[in-house]
Image: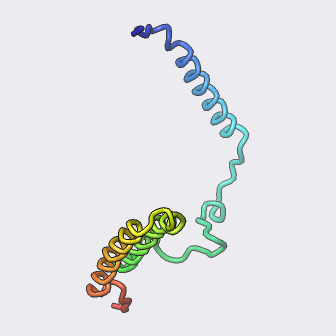
Amino acid sequence: MQESLPQDYLPVLIQLGAAFVVVCIILGLSVLLGPRLKGGVKDDAFECGIESDGDARTPISVRYFMIAILFVLFDVEIIFMYPWAVNFMKLGWFGFVEMIIFLSFLMAGFYYVIRKGILTWTQT
């Protein structure tokens, strides 16, 4: 096994130095040539044409996050079901039984979520 010498890393150091110089030049040119306009309208947040109203730090219900997480959790299950459906004939009965077991675990989790009342949306 051949040992690497410090001069073997010289091309890498040159490339890193060149990248650093290019980044510094581009940032410097953007500061020198870029517009310097400041103002209330320019500094306002812009979101889909709707003007900002109120504080961005308003509390949001935890139920919203729970439903979002559950959506992602149950939505990702489709990723597992699609390849199974494509290869259904090749997998045979073994694949069918495996998917039934998988769906039973999935439905048990869904039943638990419903029993806990996470999906009931009430104003508090």
Q: Position of residue 79 (x, y in %)?
A: 48, 65
Relative height, residue 76 to residue 8 (above, below): below
Residue in the picture at 60% in, 65% down: 44
Q: Position of residue 46 (x, y in %)?
A: 62, 67
Return the residue nearer the eye: 107 or 83. Answer: 83
Return the residue nearer the eye: 53 or 112. Answer: 112
How many numbered tags mark residues here? 0
Image quadrant for the N terminus? top left
Residue in the picture at 68% in, 39% down: 30
User: Residue 69: in sight, yes or no?
Assistant: no
Q: Position of residue 3 (x, y in %)?
A: 40, 8
Relative height, residue 92 to residue 16 (above, below): below
Relative height, residue 8 to residue 49 (above, below): above
Q: Position of residue 64 (x, y in %)?
A: 40, 78
Residue in the picture at 49% in, 7% down: 7
Colouring style: rainbow
Return the residue nearer the eye: 86 or 10. Answer: 86
Return the residue nearer the eye: 18 or 112. Answer: 112
Q: Is residue 113 left or right of residue 42?
A: left
Q: Is residue 46 left or right of residue 55?
A: right
Rendering quarter of residue 123: bottom left
User: Residue 78: in sight, yes or no?
Assistant: yes
Q: Is residue 117 left or right of residue 99?
A: left
Image quadrant for the C terminus? bottom left
Residue in the picture at 36% in, 68% down: 98
Rendering quarter of residue 20: top right
